[in-house]
Image (cartoon, grey):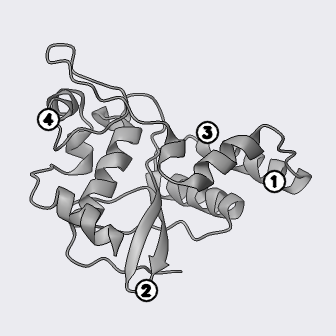
Amino acid sequence: MPYLGYRAIIEGRNIPSPSTAAEFGQRAKLQTNPKTAIYDGFYDIHHPADTSALPIEVYHPVFQQFMRDITTAKPSRELLIKVRGLMRASTGMGTVGLPLAENLRSALAGILGRCVEQVIVSDAIPGGVVLKSFGEFSVPLLAMEHKREIGEGGCDPMTQASYYVLKYWQEERVSATGL
């Protein structure tokens, strides 16, 4: 399985919890080390490192096909209504995070046609995850984090989701639920 190869690459790395890794100071420190960096273009200005990501098309031909198809896409009315629902769910404000996160997972699941659930991995609790099962292995296709406002929680949600995926791959055994 190629996924075991990826797991072997990151095994043994000392990666903090996703919320800690996504804090500004911690993230800058992690971006200086090739073993813990997220290749998204962000870098520590005091210790510059090339963290540029490769074009997504090099990872699998499906992305190249997507890039061609998206230029002529004509979304259906139904999809546009679902996207409007997702945008409404993502801009909800309130003091209780659980209903907001559940509304967002539900709206995203409606668009993707897949279950978006919380899969807790060691000290990592994501806002939502979409998994794909391959035999006895499950692969995260999407990890999401939602913040009600910029700076909430003191960390970047994109980075937090990225480190969740790293934590996921470090787990001995992660099984899919809801698939």
x and y percent of residue 90 in the render?
Answer: 60, 44
- Sequence order check, earlier mark of 4 and 2: 4
Circle 1: residue type: Leu
Residue that numbered label 2 is attached to? 135
As drawn, is 87 to the left or to the right of 25? right
The residue positioned farthest toward the top in the image shown: 46
Q: Nearer the viewer, residue 55 or 147?
A: 55
Residues at circles 1 and 3 in contact by the CB criterion of under 8 Å: no
Question: Which residue in the protein does label 4 denote?
Answer: 33
x%, y% of residue 61? 58, 53
Tell me if residue 158 comes above or below residue 110 in the rendering.
above
How crowded is the residue under tag 3: few (<14 C-alpha within 10 Å), some, or many (20+)? some
Q: Looking at the image, is mark 1 or mark 3 nearer the viewer?
A: 1
Q: Are marks 1 and 2 in contact (CB under 8 Å)?
A: no
| Gap between marks 1 and 4 measured at Cα | 41 Å
Q: Earlier in the sequence, mark 2 or mark 3?
A: 3
Q: Earlier in the sequence, mark 3 or mark 4?
A: 4
Dot 1 or dot 4: first in sequence order is 4
Element class at badge 2? loop
Which residue type carries mark 2?
Gly
Camera-nearest label, 2 or 3: 2
Confirm whether residue 82 shows in the render: yes
**Which one is closest to the eye, mark 1 or mark 4?**
4
SS class, disc 1: helix
Q: Which of the labelled discs sits on residue 97, or is there none?
A: none
Q: Nearer the viewer, mark 1 or mark 2?
A: 2
Q: CA distance from mark 4 to mark 2?
A: 33 Å
Q: Earlier in the sequence, mark 1 or mark 2?
A: 1
Q: Which mark is residue 91?
A: 3
